[in-house]
Image (cartoon, rainbow, N blue to C red):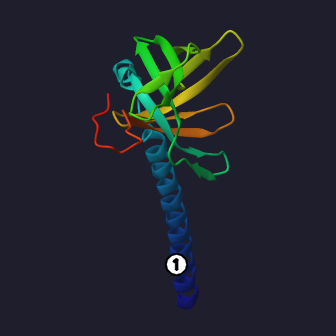
Amino acid sequence: MAGFAIKDTADRWKQLLIKMYSMKNTFMILVLSLLFVSCKQQIKPADIAKLNGYWEIEKVVFDKGEKKAYGMNENFDYFQIKGTKGIRTKVMVQLYGTFLTTDTFENVSVRFTDKGTFLDYKTDYAKWSEELISISDEAFVVKNDQNKEYHYKKSGPVNLLNDGKKTK
């Protein structure tokens, strides 16, 4: 009979250890999930001023993880936003580092929701939104409705001739 008691106790310990291991894995998954969710940057209204200036696309990350890196860009995006309203226009870099602008632009409105921060664009022909994922002084990331992430880097004057002249 003593053999049965020992075996029964060992089985109980084994089951208890299996339950504890399973609970530990569940707890770890929960903690990691909360960590990933809390890592998303909280964008504040004061951060929006960082968008002002010249930006070039560094890369695009597609919804399935593929990436397209951009080398030298001819076209840049110029943002001018005050408060939550402004414009975005495409500009083209010139040989001596200045930018050529056009009269075309998109009106931009910044919208804060409990789901994130959005840039709402409007022209005479279309309306669309992009979620502002992250922003710093040197970079920002937006995601469109097709789950493409556009990674931008801050830009300034570029001297394409590399002739030593100071750019504006």
Residue 26 left/right relative to 123: left
The quadrant of the image that shows the N terminus is bottom right
Q: Nearer the viewer, residue 117 or 119?
A: 119
Q: Residue at x 53, y 89 (%)?
A: 2
The residue shown at (36%, 25%) is: 50
* x 59%, y 15%: residue: 104
**In the image, residue 5 lies at what x, y percent?**
54, 83
Q: Position of residue 52 (x, y in %)?
A: 39, 22
Residue lying at the far right in this picture: please name it.
125
Which image quarter holds the C terminus? top left
Judge from the rendering whether residue 78 lies leftward or rightward of residue 47; answer left or right: right
Q: Position of residue 77 (x, y in %)?
A: 50, 28
Residue at 41% x, 30% y is 42
Figure check: 9 above or below 114: below
Reply above or below: 45 against 41: above
- In this rendering, the count of numbered labels is 1
Which residue carries the number 1 mark? 9
Taking depth in this image into account, of 82 and 76 the one nearest to the observer is 76
Residue 155 visible in rendering: yes
Q: Residues within 10 Å of mark 1 (few under 14, many from 20)?
A: few
Residue 112 visible, this angle? no
Quadrant for residue 39, please give it. top left
Name the element at disc 1: helix
Residue type at mark 1? Thr
